[in-house]
Amino acid sequence: MSNRTIEQEFMKTKFKNFLGARDVFKDLKELPKKFQWFLVLGIVIVLVFNFVSVTAKSGESRFLPLQQYDRVLVAGSVFGQNESSAIAVAVLYSLNGLAAFTGVLAVAMIAYNRASQYFWGLINAVFFGLFALSVGYVGDFFMNIILIVGASVGWYLFEIVGLGNKKQKTHSLNWNLAFYLLIVLITFFVIMMWYWALSPAATDLFGKSNNQYVHGGTGVNGQTLQVLDGISSGMNTVGYVMQLTNMSQQFYIWFFLNIVKILKFTGLAGRDTLNVNMLIQFGVWFTISLIGLYKRNFESLFAKYFTKKK
């Protein structure tokens, strides 16, 4: 068999596992047992709080999709302000709620450096992107388009090019300082690009009267919301590029990104942006990102330290 034929067979075999779909169950089984149970708990929590509101006001439904249905009839949406639009938003909200577990699994597979991260990430991006559009999360909507487009690229780099086998290298202090300074500068630049783009994008999607970044809404500080959305979208973009190239340092970005996301839903941009359900979801993501930060950046260092100590 010629080298070219061997290479062709290799490529066929690899592409049968597109996005890591064939390794989904294998990757889950190979996770540590304690972490598997933690994922089960996290998934249950995220699913429950994607449907049950803990901040429902008097006379308001605790079923979140029904809340969204009522909201559209009162305030409208990108789809319009009628019963059909309300049903569409409620359905998209429900589908995203059902698919919420895929986000948890995507983060877990990134933490344990598995190719199926792109399978779960693509599913989550499709449903969360549609949900973000329906409820007016402009930055999240465009960010999830990037995630959808990048999924196949990331898998190709991870599986075919071989970046999935990339090992963490030890560098000098000067190299680390220069690298992290560069990352900070790039992140700042990308954040500013997102910040300037968000308001025009919101106007194009929802019209001038519904641009929360300019006019705000009841209890919403538009400028604060734009700052938080710009920071989170910018950090998400840089973190995703680092994920595509399988850089262990991506978890420093995820660490700070989840903090910004949590701040966004604490009501910092106004009382209408307080969302306990989203706080719970990003709390779960934050915990998994901490595990990934340890696994990908510190575990080997601790192992070497304790080996030398013995």
Image (cartoon, grey):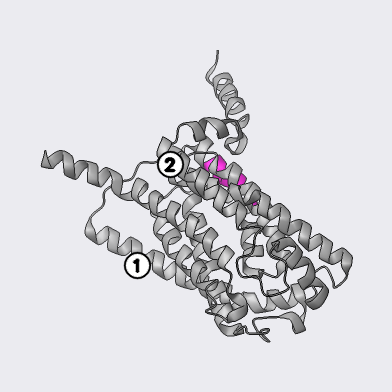
| Residue 134 horizontal/vertical position (percent) | 74, 65
Disc 2 marks which amino acid? Phe
Look at 62% across and 78% down and name the residue there. Answer: 272
Q: Earlier in the sequence, mark 2 or mark 1?
A: 2
93 versus 60 height, above or below: above
For disc 2, the marked residue is 35
Look at 88% across and 64% down and name the residue there. Answer: 84
Q: Please tell me in which quadrant of the rendered image residue 71 appears.
A: bottom right
Magenta segment: 148-157
- Magenta span main SS: helix
| Crowd tier of the residue under label 1, counting other residues whose Cα lies within 10 Å: few below 14, some 14–19, many 20 or above | few
Q: Please tell me in which quadrant of the rendered image residue 174 appears.
A: bottom left
User: Image quadrant for the C terminus?
Assistant: top left
| Residue 45 horizontal/vertical position (percent) | 55, 53
Rounded to the nearest angstrom, the CA distance separating label 2 from label 1 is 33 Å
Tell me, for residue 181, which label it has, or none: 1
Taking the image as drawn, is residue 33 in sight? yes
Residue sitting at the far left: 310
| Crowd tier of the residue under label 2, counting other residues whose Cα lies within 10 Å: few below 14, some 14–19, many 20 or above | some
Disc 1 marks which amino acid? Leu
